[in-house]
Amino acid sequence: MPDKIIEIRNLHKWFGRIHALDDVNLDVETGEVLVIIGPSGSGKSTLLRCVNHLEKPSSGHLYIDGVDLEAKDTDINEVRTEIGMVFQQFNLFPHMTALQNITLAQRIVRKRSGEEAERVGRELLERVGIPEKADSYPGQLSGGQQQRVAIARALAMNPKIMLFDEPTSALDPEMIKEVLDVMLDLAQTGITMLVVTHEMGFARAAARRMVFMDEGKIIEETTPELLFTAPKHERTKLFLSKILEH
Amino acid sequence: MPDPRPSGVSAGSPAGAAHAPRQRRWFLRFDRGWLLFIGALVLLALLVFAVGEKYAVKIPIPALGITIQFGDPYGRIIQFLFDGILTTLKLTIISFLLILVVGVFGGLGRVSHNRFISTIAWLYVEIVRGIPVLVWLLWIWFALPQLIQGAGRVLVQACEGSSAGWVQAITCPLGETVSGIKLQPIPAAVLGFTFAYGAYMTEIFRAGIQSIAKGQMEAARSLGMTNIQAMRYIILPQAVRVILPPVSNEFVTLLKDSSLVSILAVSDLTRRGREFVARTFLSFDTFTMVALCYLILTLFFTRVSTEIERRAAVEKR
């Protein structure tokens, strides 16, 4: 039986009076690809950001590989080295080249040597399909290329979990495929992935499980086929009808 | 992809990317700012060397076949002011370096997650900015020494009044040193400027740090970097480019405000001017020269900072 690499128990998150996460309980198994969908404001991004503690839960517990994120003696920076995150806005470091973006954290956090970090970096750039852009600055790259560098940057830390927060939502349509291809490729490697997205094609192809969230709660949790063909709840049906139309 | 630039200067020149940029770069370098600076220098030179009822000093240079005439009174004035100019420059530069240090730490303190640190930083800024720089200088020159003397007295009394060995070990040597502190004019001025301007520099750094998008910090932290690593490698390098304009502006402001130390018995440019007037009553000529000297200095440093800003902006690409 595969281990549960993420365990979320009774998670609540308030932003002032807004109840962003309402008693969320979720387990993610090692190597699983989980896709989270839902309308905007449903709390899916918040949930993702709680996993690597970019948002601090108001109450409840999160266990990453058995480690309680809320415990006082947990070193959050150590936990974060095992979790890679890809952002909607890419968030590449503009004053560094693509390769430098990828090697920085390797050197100062994982304490790898310069040569090793560069080797890993070039390998990953090759893997995401843009080895020639190693010495380019983010400002010189297209959105799709920037996001691929961002994925490489996160992968360079050899994390156990990869989080994707709407990775293609800020991209022009013609560049979405190149990023999704990288993500699909990644899904085959057996790494645990948590993806918040609207790209249903990707979900169908890669997800083992899907979660539908609305108003801070998990409404439904099942396989992609079952979710698309036979959703149980009204709200799920309503949401799917809106986005699957076109 | 290079974007087509409006070519007002090179209109009509033959097709050739080689011509247009060179012309433009030369034009920009030698813009009206530099022309004004050179104009002021020329004016100064004319006044000093060519104007005056009688020529105080004539220095013949046979090799060149000319005679340099040191004009009167402007020649005399500039000779007297020269030390003041050096003092002003030294004072400004040393203070500014210290102010930068205060600014960095103050700015980081203002954005710190530690409630205690950020409150102290906030208090510093609010209180110091609420009092005019001149008043701060006066306070540090007149009030602070008395405070120090008082503290020294308290320590000495504690030292003499106590019989406990450990108390004496602390208070006696401390009391002696504190009582012996005598604030000299220039250190007092540097201290005053560092303290007062540090608050403004703190705010400049704070704004610069906060102007860097939140996503940058999030990306850094999500890679496992500590707050300090994120600041050092990601936030501050980017913030520096943002704050270069206001920081260089502060330097020029400090250069002008350094004239305030003339009331503290520091022989800067302004004070030298006043001393000369007190002796010779040549108020028009003297203060015109003082003004011209300040203008030349500020024009020069403004040009330098514009250049720095331009280079920093270009590098970012």
Image (cartoon, helix red, strand yellow):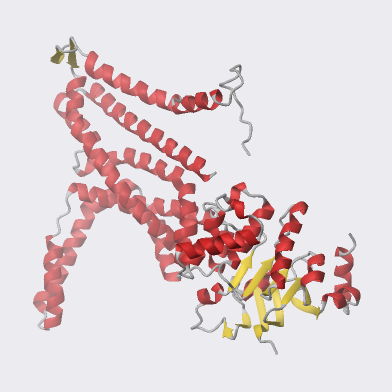
Q: Quadrant of the N terminus of chain A?
A: bottom right
Q: Based on the displayed image, in which of its 4 quarters is residue B30 positioned?
A: top left
- Indicate whether B214 appears above or below A22: above
Q: Quadrant of the C terminus of chain A?
A: bottom right
Which residue is drawn at the image coordinates 61% and 27% (left, top)?
B6
Asked whether the viewer can see residue B112, the reply is no
Q: State left or right for residue A127 relative to residue B115.
A: right
Q: Position of residue A102 (x, y in %)?
A: 55, 61
Q: State left or right for residue A151 relative to residue B296.
A: right
How many numbered discs, if any?
Answer: 0
Q: State left or right for residue A124 relative to residue A188.
A: left
Q: Based on the displayed image, in which of its 4 quarters is residue A155 positioned?
A: bottom right
- Indicate whether B143 appears above or below A63: above
- Indicate whether B150 appears above or below A133: below
Asked whether the viewer can see residue A173, the reply is yes
Q: Position of residue B165 (x, y in %)?
A: 11, 82
- Indicate whether B7 appears above or below A26: above
Q: Position of residue A133 (x, y in %)?
A: 60, 51
Q: Based on the displayed image, in which of its 4 quarters is residue A44 positioned?
A: bottom right
Which residue is drawn at the image coordinates 54% and 55% (left, top)?
B212
